[in-house]
Image: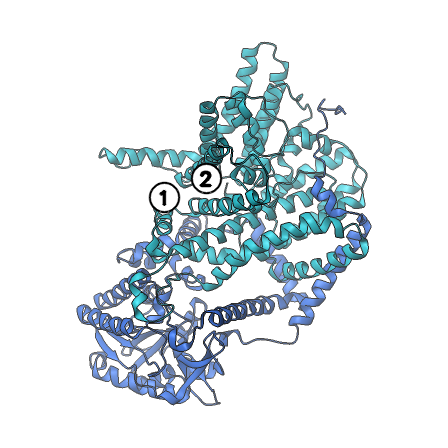
Amino acid sequence: MIFNSFTYVFFLAIVVVVYWLLPRRPRQLFLFAASITFYGFWRFDYVLIMLASAFTDFFAAINIHKAKEPAKRRLWLALSLAVNFGLLFYFKYANFVVGNINGLAHLIGRDDLLATWSVVLPVGISFYTFQTVSYTVDVYRGRIEPIREPLLYGLFVTFFVHLVAGPILRAAEVIPQLDRRKPFEVEFLASGLWLILNGLFLKCVLADNIGGYVDEGFGANPATLSATDVWVLAVLFGFQIYFDFAAYSQIAIGSARLMGVIFPPNFYFPYVATSPRDFWRRWHISLSSWIRDYLYLPLCGVRPHDESRGGLVPVGDKVGAARRNAALIATWFIMGLWHGAGWTFALWGLWHALLILVQRAIAGLGLMRRHTRLRGALGWVFTFPAVMLGWVFFRAQNLEQAWAMLRQVLQPGKYLLLDRLHSGYLWSALPIGIDPVGYLIAAILPVATLVAYFVYRDLWPRWSQRAVVALPAMIAYGTVVAAFVFVYLRPVRQFIYFQF
Amino acid sequence: MDHAVTGMDSRAPREDAAARDAIGRVSAGARVAAFVVAVALGLCAVWWLFAGKSEDFAAAGLGVNTSVHEESLHVASRRVVCFGLDDLDRCLSALPPSRRRRRVLWLGWSQLYAINDFHVGDRTAPSLLAERLAAADIDLIVIAMPNINPREELLVYAYVRQRLALSGLIVPAWLQGMKREGIRPTWAAALADPAVRTALAALPSGPSILAANAQEAKSAQEIAQIAQKTAQEPTQTTQQRVEGWLLARLDARFPLWRLRGEAQGRIKLALMDGKEQVLRLRNLLLGTRAKNWVNVIPPARQAINMQALTDLVGAARHDGLSVLLYVPPRPRHEFPFDPALYTAFKADAERLARASGAAFANIEDSVDDGVWGRIDNGAGELVTDFSHFTAVGHRQMAGAMHDALAATILPQLR
């Protein structure tokens, strides 16, 4: 089931009402059944794959905890990782690997060495795999004790609000909340409803409508695009994916909130980031926190954190520069591939590694010691376009397209048709190959983001202290948003992150 | 706090500081009430803004007092002009069933179906030409859509060719049509037909069209495979079936719900209007006027579209059709293209026709200056609409086109 549909609105309303009426055990059973139904609206046969992955970890974690010898503990951990990553590899990466082997074989004159196979990627496999793996690893590390109630564990993995696209949460953050029978509070309703309305607005009104311009631009032959077209498309896609994924996260967090379950925020104005590292503290925070704790910090040999917030953190001088840099590159390479089985995604990851390396180099020169407004502004001016340009890799169909688009950006002649300057017509030298409305939207969005950030951070905390100001503001905002959501709510596009 | 079942610390995330600040001193009950009031007001706003009024979306972007009228598209009871896949079957099935009759396909854009300053009884050029050709046992079928591009024309031809035995093809050499290269969704569905994909794949432009619309092609393939394997199984997911059922009920019972389409269309028009305002600001700041402004076609895109046009004419000739490539009517004194580029474009089109064995006709001066419509050029100036004209213009165009056909491919068709 997808969030941006009327089916989900009705489904959620029924689930929330029944949830609060039931006692603890039947409530868990009901929520588990509702979660399976939610997933089954896409394909019921793939529910078994999800449960196989989940319950492998359930038993592995108990055995890890029971085992006295380190070798046995490692064996159970290895089994869990093999099953989880094996499934992920089979469904997501096997054809990618076969394609690369065939490509190499072609170079030595052997065509179609290995056959690819037709396989449908289970929705959300990347998310629930990371979630269950984090559970087993946490038990192995002795951070948590294993859960002995299969129903509770099954609910932790399949809980429908974060099942298919996160946030990727830790067992210790979710399970105690699912297990306790909290009394109903109006606060749950208040925050949940507003978050869901915001999320639907971001998805149905902003992301889906921007998506039309993005699809048209990226569907065009790159040679027909000017340098400014590519920049505009990069910005448009950057905002489309942000609105799309932030929307999913807000609806997920809001839906959980309606049931009294509190998730941490997954996005915090990523496009106001003043450095690449700052960006990753604001973008998909639960994923970057996961990567930090289960990949980057272990590779650096540093003790990991244990919560899905905070994003990437600097490891400081405790680790040598060579090891830090190698860990960073490996982490981002894997982070890229996690998003999709393609070299474009790997390059997107490496692009971000490069940006952070550049940031480290600049910091090493002592230029970033003092936090001044000027430094923040300069940081934004460099970070924003760099992050946006990276989205070209992410959205391109293949490496050829990505390279062809980026080549336009690198050629001064693609900003202006110099050979047309003599013609005497003002506009004939400006090559605009996409709908001018796209230019308009791309110009408005960054400015609107900065304004929204300013209002949210500086003005709203003051306004909200006075109900006489806050309530009319909320009603005015909510009226506009609700009207737009009513007009545009339709499942025309899946959430982009569903494919990961 | 140790958790009773798991022994875990309860590390449930706290509300982050920003979110706590955002809530401020407004109580939860007040926020729920505000939500309910906001949703109710939002729905009232939709009703107030969009109920009881309806916009003619077909006329959007057509210029001042230029519109589309169903009755002007017919000859006798047959609709001559079709727009998309959804009404094509209706158009084709209305053709007289006779093996002796010849069928000619005419592709084009809104020039063929929009009339400026419409009066009851006015007819479009396709309707008038179809009447004259019918007397010679030739059926004219026109497929037109706003700003059609040659890649779309190639797809339309490949699709119609699978469904109708054609004898002739009329295609415009239209510079404005070179501005876009995408296939609009209403026609991309034609790629679901394997015969269309096969026909396109054999042409130089075809692979890029198929690749750019891979989703349509791929999903159609998958659907075809599934349909073959399990004819009885539904191809929709549970989500799609339930959503369809729900929407049908909402549509049937709630008038407010039915306003959504109208609202979406009018918001889109408002966005276009917003664009015009921004262009006006640009023009004001940069001193842009109709006289120093030209419509720019990216050179690489023009090359891609010329290739598609070449493929279209070549494919039709290869299929044994008589083909007429024509330069369409345009106003003589106001025309928003660089004259040197436009002259070169016409010369290229003529070369293309000659090289493919197609006929070529230039009817650009066939419509008098006084019968063109007016359009806002985005600078707040009303200038000559370079695409649309009155019923008089349609009569002139029909006459010129008939003369061009008579001088070129009509004898072969007879």
- Category of crowding for the residue at label 2, using alpha-carbon neighbours closer than 10 angstroms: few (below 14), some (14–19), many (at least 20): some
Q: Nearer the viewer, residue A26 or B348?
A: B348
Left or right of B382, for residue B311: left
Q: Is residue A434 left or right of residue A302?
A: left
Q: Which residue is mark 1?
A: A399
Residue at 47% from the left image edge and 87% from the top image edge: B117
For the point 39% across and 36% down, the residue is A95
| Position in image of residue A238 (x %, y %) | 50, 49
Q: Which chain does tag 1 point to? A: A
How many numbered marks, from 0 up?
A: 2
The answer to whether tags 2 and 1 share a subunit is yes
Question: Which residue matches tag 2?
Answer: A340
In which quadrant will I find the N terminus of chain B?
Answer: top right
Q: Is residue B366 above or below residue B84?
A: below
**Residue occupying the point 77% across, 47% down:** B24
Chain letter for blue?
A: B
Split into 4 quadrants, where in the image is the C terminus of chain B? bottom left
* Rendered colour, chain A: cyan
